[in-house]
Amino acid sequence: MWYIAFTLGLMGSLHCVGMCGPLAIAFSKGKQNSKFSNLIASLSYNFGRTITYAVLGLLFGLLGSFLFLADLQKVLSIALGLILVTSFLFSIDLDQKISGSSYFKTFYQKVQNILQAIMKKADTYPSILLGLANGLLPCGLVYLALAGALATGNLLLGMAFMFIFGLGTIPMLLALSLSNGAMPQRWRIRFQKILPYVSLCFGVFLIYRGFVVEMPTELNFWEALKNPVMCH
């Protein structure tokens, strides 16, 4: 399952280039440091995001563990997959639906206020703080990954899934921040349109996994295919 998490982060990070990229670029420019210092700052920023993702994965993995104990892991995998596929077929913006909810608006506003305060004093705050806060911003790609963490049905596996997902998002955002936004704006806009297709593929995977694979607790997809449960 770990290659799924990393691939989801790597492919989905093309979406991040358009959404979170400008923030990372603005932060690196604000530092006004040498290239090496900017590299360290960018790595710290991205590692901060990954830490936040891991904590979120721990929480969603814990929730999934209760569902696993209730023998609902297969049902959960299929249900999550159907939601993702349906959102693609009917062009439903899950990102907007979730972030627009009254339950989340107040929380997201507080996170944005924290980010603005850090950005105003970028030279005095460590880069990792911006990354930690940025990881809490509404993001459709993160919601996808959290669905995967929830489906692991395990606290530690959920945390590991989100940590590896975070690592997958780093290469593209790191390259963008170090290039000072050299990528044309039109390409960043196009990349934002990739997320629905990533969502569709991940949704199909979750549905297939729920119907076909005998659910191993470690959620090792390929091992489950290579070693199917045999009847004696």
Image (cartoon, rainbow, N blue to C red):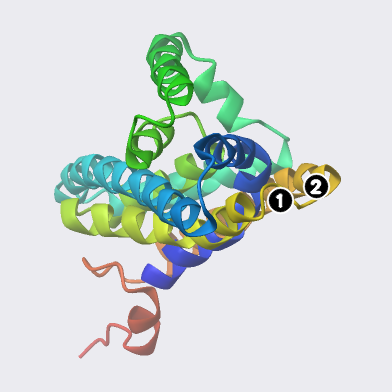
Along the line of sight, the residue nearer the viewer: 50 or 178: 178
What x and y, as percent, mark residue 64? Answer: 24, 45
* Crowding near the residue tagged with mark 1, few <14, some 14–19, many ≥20 C-alpha atoms within 10 Å: some
Task: Name the residue rendered at 67%, 31% in the picture.
Answer: 92
Q: Which mark is residue 194?
A: 1
Label tally: 2
Label 1 amino acid? Ile
Kind of element beneath mark 1: helix
Mark number, residue 98: none
Give yes or no for contact between labels 2 and 1 (Cβ–Cβ under 8 Å). yes
Compared to 45, does 198 lie above or below? below
Answer above or below: position of 55 versus 97: below
Left or right: residue 191 versus residue 84 is right
Residue matched to label 2: 190
Spot occupied by residue 177 in the image (x, y as percentages of width and height): 59, 50
| Quadrant into which the N terminus falls | bottom left
Residue 156, can we see it? yes
